[in-house]
């Protein structure tokens, strides 16, 4: 994307990603723990779709690495899957923008499924159906996240 | 994209295969600590508000309960001191090695949710308080786990219930030694590799055996819940309930490396506790050093009744 305009208010992007990271760690009641949406992936995907020239694979990779450190998994696992998610979305961002929200959500579903698949494969000996719950909740959260971040982008004129 | 894949693979390899990548990870954890601290703020705030608005009646009740339990504990401690001194004397007579004295440092749990499928917690003490990898962690009821990773401000503790964690134990009743391994999320622990004729019963108390040199001797680990002998299997199937409150404890205790009691009887404890106290001026919550007073200062007194 050869947009000639200068980057503006890039800190808002960083701020939303950080907020998403906090949401990943805020303690939830025991029953809700397995239903936590993948906030960071959702945020990254929104920015990759809206401003692919700003949020690149590198940003995705870096936030993945930070998540790896925070969650205590093997370094590089989430870094890889986040970068991959950003790549997929950025590759198809023009089509995705045209889709209605529910169709976007379906795409989001498959991408989050991929991301989650990588991190599930990376560890966890015991497998049960709860492992996949974040994929479902993430998809359900997309219709909320998308307008919210769009509002933020327009209000602060992030570009 | 290719670059990201390569970088991921490189980091992945470095982290899992090479040991000298540890410091890098430790630095990264330190950088991330503010984020974690922020994430734990809401729940800390809720706790604080709850405490603030506790009414008088509740507080009174609490004080009565605490007083009662304090009396009971100190009564037990009196007996314990006498017993410990007796034990020391007997060991001296036997010429065996002296028991190590342990000091503990209080750490607080950072209320942060990690991957719900791994049994790890983060505590608010790190290398700045001398926390080291492999340090045993206890709570008020028993062993919780051990430190797996340290950074400057925080460290990560793996709990007994983690499938990758094992701890050497012995049965209080008959001294039978065994290894207890975690089984993950919400499951009981299991006791491995005991043959069918092993003398284990439901209700047996397990304490650390001190073999392996990582955990100190004699701290409660758990209680045997059920013993089964499945047909056609070489080993018994023994389930153990952990003694520590793994999911609810907020204050943990880090066991500092033991020192021999008799090397410097009088200087040892006060100096050491002062040293740790100066590290943390905010004594009330940051860190207070408890040392189990073995009464070694008055070890010369013929005060025991059984002399």
Image: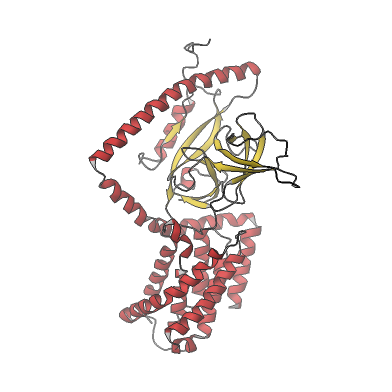
Residue B295 visible in the displayed image: no
Query: At 62% across and 37% down in the image, what residue appears?
Result: B169
In the rendered view, would you say B98 is above or below B106? above
Query: At 43% across and 87% down in the image, what residue appears?
Result: A100
Residue A7 in percent (x, y) is at: 39, 81
Q: Is residue B71 left or right of residue A76?
A: left
Quadrant in which the C terminus of chain A appears: bottom left
In the rendered view, would you say B120 is above or below B167? below
Query: At 41% across and 60% down in the image, what residue appears?
Result: A26
Extreme residue in the front direction: B231
Residue B53 visible in the displayed image: yes
In the rendered view, would you say A155 is above or below A72? below
Residue B195 in percent (x, y) is at: 73, 39
Q: Is residue B295 left or right of residue B62?
A: right
In the rendered view, would you say B151 is above or below A47? above
Query: At 59% across and 34% down in the image, what residue appears?
Result: B204
Relative depth, front residue between A134 and A147 = A134
């Amino acid at each position: 994307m050869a947009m000639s305009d200068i980057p503006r208010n890039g800190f808002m992007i960083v701020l939303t990603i950080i907020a998403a990271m906090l949401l990943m760690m805020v303690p939830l009641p025991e029953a809700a723990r397995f239903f936590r949406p993948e906030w960071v992936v959702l945020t990254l995907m929104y920015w990759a779709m809206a401003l692919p020239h700003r949020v690149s694979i590198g940003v995705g990779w870096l936030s993945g690495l930070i998540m790896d450190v925070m969650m205590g998994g093997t370094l590089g696992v989430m870094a890889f899957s986040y970068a991959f998610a950003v790549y997929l979305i950025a590759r198809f961002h023009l089509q995705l923008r045209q889709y209605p929200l529910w169709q976007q959500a379906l795409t989001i579903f498959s991408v989050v499924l991929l991301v989650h698949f990588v991190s599930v494969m990376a560890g966890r000996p015991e497998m049960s159906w709860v492992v996949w719950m974040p994929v479902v909740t993430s998809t359900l959260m997309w219709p909320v996240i998308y307008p919210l971040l769009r509002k933020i982008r327009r209000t602060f004129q992030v570009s | 994209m290719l670059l990201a894949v390569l970088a991921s693979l490189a980091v992945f390899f470095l982290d899992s295969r090479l040991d000298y990548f540890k410091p890098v990870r430790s630095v990264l954890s330190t950088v991330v600590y503010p984020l974690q601290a922020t994430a734990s703020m809401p729940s800390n705030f809720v706790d604080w508000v709850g405490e603030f608005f506790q009414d008088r009646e509740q507080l009174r009740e609490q004080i009565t309960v605490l007083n009662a339990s304090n009396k009971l504990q100190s009564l037990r401690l009196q007996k314990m001191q006498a017993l410990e001194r007796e034990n020391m004397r007997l060991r001296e007579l036997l010429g065996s090695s002296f028991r190590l004295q342990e000091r503990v440092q209080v750490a607080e749990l950072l209320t942060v949710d990690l991957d719900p499928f791994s049994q790890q917690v983060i505590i608010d003490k790190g290398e700045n308080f001398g926390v080291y990898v492999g340090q045993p962690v206890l709570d008020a009821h028993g062993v919780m786990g051990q430190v797996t990773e340290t950074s400057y401000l925080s460290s990560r503790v793996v709990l007994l219930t983690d499938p990758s964690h094992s701890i050497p134990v012995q049965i209080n009743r008959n001294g039978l030694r065994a290894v207890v391994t975690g089984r993950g999320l919400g499951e009981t622990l299991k006791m491995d590799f005991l043959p069918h004729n092993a003398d284990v019963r439901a209700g047996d108390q397990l304490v650390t055996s001190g073999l392996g040199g990582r955990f100190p001797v004699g701290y409660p680990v758990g209680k045997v819940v059920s013993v089964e002998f499945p047909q056609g299997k070489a080993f018994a199937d023994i389930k153990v309930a952990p003694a520590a409150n793994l999911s609810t404890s907020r204050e943990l205790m880090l066991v500092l490396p033991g020192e021999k009691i008799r090397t410097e009887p009088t200087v040892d404890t006060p100096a050491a506790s002062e040293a740790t106290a100066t590290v943390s001026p905010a004594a009330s919550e940051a860190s207070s050093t408890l040392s189990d007073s073995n009464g070694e200062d008055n070890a010369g007194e013929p005060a025991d009744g059984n002399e």
